Amino acid sequence: MVYYLLSIAADLDNLTDLQPRGGCDDPTYPYYFKVKCEGCGETSLKESCVMLSEQVPLSTGKGVAHLVQKCKLCGREGNVQMITGHGQPLTLQQSQREEYGKLMIFDSRGFEPTDFSFADGWKAQSIAGTSFDVDLSTGEFAEYDDKGKHPVGIVNVRAKFSIVRRKDRQGRKDSFI
């Protein structure tokens, strides 16, 4: 099993705390990404959708996952399980330092997640305290904060998947490095 951390970065203008609308562990937020088969190396043409609120049984009948699908080329089955409790909003300070914020960890078996797609369903807060619903499907967001009397915006959104491992190799703790 391999654990993949999805991290996001963006250039935030007078905004902070960018995250899915219901928080980083929002059960209704759909994560869209492509998967690469670890068997044959084929990358899916279409994006897969993974949500905490949706689980499907494994073909073995032993357990469930948030995504179960077969590779279109070789027929190998893979699955993805989401691991909650590790995501944090992307802050203005992280943006200014050009750092990535941790969003979600995926336990992936048979597939490697790639090419995360930003969509609608995000939120951010202005430095004046105004909350904004954010649609990142076009890769940017621009608005005006009447309360703070300044423009707000998000550009240069990017995401990456990186391999992480558990601190406790026996799996007793859900902490990662």
Image (cartoon, rainbow, N blue to C red):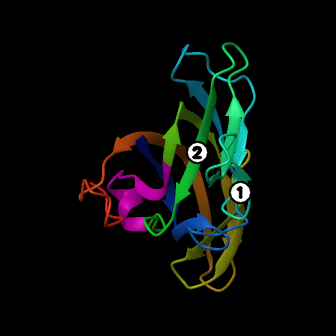
Look at the picture and state if 81 lies above or below 112.
below
Q: Mark 2 or mark 1, which is nearer the start of the sequence?
A: 1
Give the image location of residue 119, x and y in percent: 72, 50
Q: Quadrant of residue 45?
A: top right
Q: Quadrant of the C terminus?
A: bottom left
Q: Who's the residue at 53% across and 31% down the image?
A: 110
Name the mark on residue 80: 2
Look at the picture and state if 172 lies above or below 71.
below
Kind of element beneath mark 1: loop
Is residue 135 a member of the stretch shown in magenta? no
Q: Quadrant of the N terminus?
A: top left
Q: Who's the residue at 69% across and 81% down the image?
A: 146
Camera-side residue: 77 or 138?
77
Give the image location of residue 90, x and y in percent: 46, 63
Q: Judge from the rendering whether residue 120 lies leftward or rightward of residue 152; answer left or right.
A: right
Camera-side residue: 101 or 44?
44
Q: Judge from the rendering whether residue 138 lies leftward or rightward of residue 128; answer left or right.
A: right
List the single residue furthest toward the front: 61
Q: Quadrant of residue 41?
A: top right
Q: Amino acid at mark 1?
A: Gln
Give the image location of residue 95, x and y in percent: 41, 58
Look at the picture and state if 157 lies above or below 110.
below
Q: Who's the residue at 62% across and 80% down the image?
A: 149
Look at the picture and state if 163 lies above or below 85.
above
Cα–Cα span, label 1 and label 2: 10 Å
What range is drawn magenta here? 92-106
Q: Judge from the rendering whether residue 89 lies leftward or rightward of residue 165; answer left or right.
A: right
How dense is the environment of label 2, judged by Cα within 10 Å: few (below 14), some, or many (20 and up)? many
Q: Amino acid at mark 2?
A: Val
Camera sees residue 38: yes
Q: Which residue is mark 1?
A: 55
Is residue 94 a member of the stretch shown in magenta? yes
